[in-house]
Image (cartoon, helix red, strand yellow):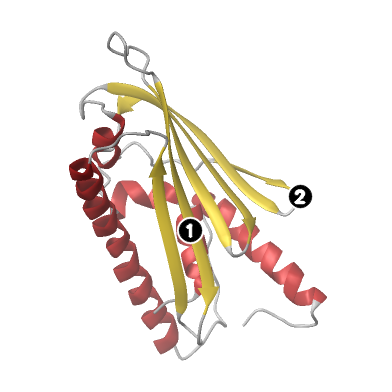
Amino acid sequence: AANWVLIRENVMDLTHIAFLHKNTFKQDDWITAPDTYMEGETVCYEQEFDLAPLSPLFCAGMGLPEDKPIKRVQKGRMPSLAISFSDWNVHDPNPDEGRRSDFIMRGCHIVTPSTRGHTHYWWGAAFDVPEISDDVAEKTKTSVVAAFDEDKYLLQKLQANVAADPRGLDFLEVTLGADGAGVKVRQILNKKLKAEGRVLN
């Protein structure tokens, strides 16, 4: 029960992970905004992190200890307003003998507007690890679903607040550095609406 633009802004600003998902993702180093840029009409962000423990949501799937410092490069792409990807590129600088050092976890977010204030939202997460046990897969899925439920709860509260505001959308909005990708999302949307002779409302 949330407008699809709110969902788009949420998945393109992952600085919220350190706060909203403090007890699920436990990735508390993501507190600064990534670099955002455009490739044609594709919104992109990228950020490299210093050595730090990986979110325990992904450690089991990659076979990494939860306390081992690893390098991480986060990359996101939104090639259309309907779909975006968020990649966790993980590098273990000191792998155990015979163990691989590079992994990727890819998130996919697909939105389809429904009735006003409602959206069909499909998401998925996948590892480039060919042999994950059923037990690890199930535990990881349960943890990731719990984190996404935190997003769902907050987004629905935001939508309810917007719907209850007598000003509608006629108010001053303040954007911060972390909103860079979200602003680009709206710019693309407004460009497409203008081409159709419509306006964002």
Label 1 is placed on what type of residue? His
Residue at the bottom extreme of this rendering: 166
Residue 19, image x and y in percent? 30, 51
| 80 left or right, relative to 9 | right
Q: Is residue 23 among what the camera can see?
A: no
Q: CA distance from mark 2 to mark 1?
A: 20 Å
Figure quadrant of the N terminus: bottom left
Q: Quadrant of residue 29?
A: top left
In the rendered image of this protein, does residue 28 appear above or below residue 6?
above
Q: Earlier in the sequence, mark 2 or mark 1?
A: 2
| Residue labelled with disc 2 | 40
Seen from the viewer's position, the closer of residues 184 and 2 is 2
- Residue depicted at 29% across the width and 70% down the height: 153
Residue 198, image x and y in percent? 74, 83
Q: Quadrant of residue 157?
A: bottom left
Q: How many marks?
A: 2
- Residue depicted at 24% across the width and 58% down the height: 146
- Residue depicted at 28% across the width and 64% down the height: 149
Q: Are marks 2 and 1 in contact (CB under 8 Å)?
A: no
Residue 66, image x and y in percent? 21, 30
| Residue labelled with disc 1 | 109
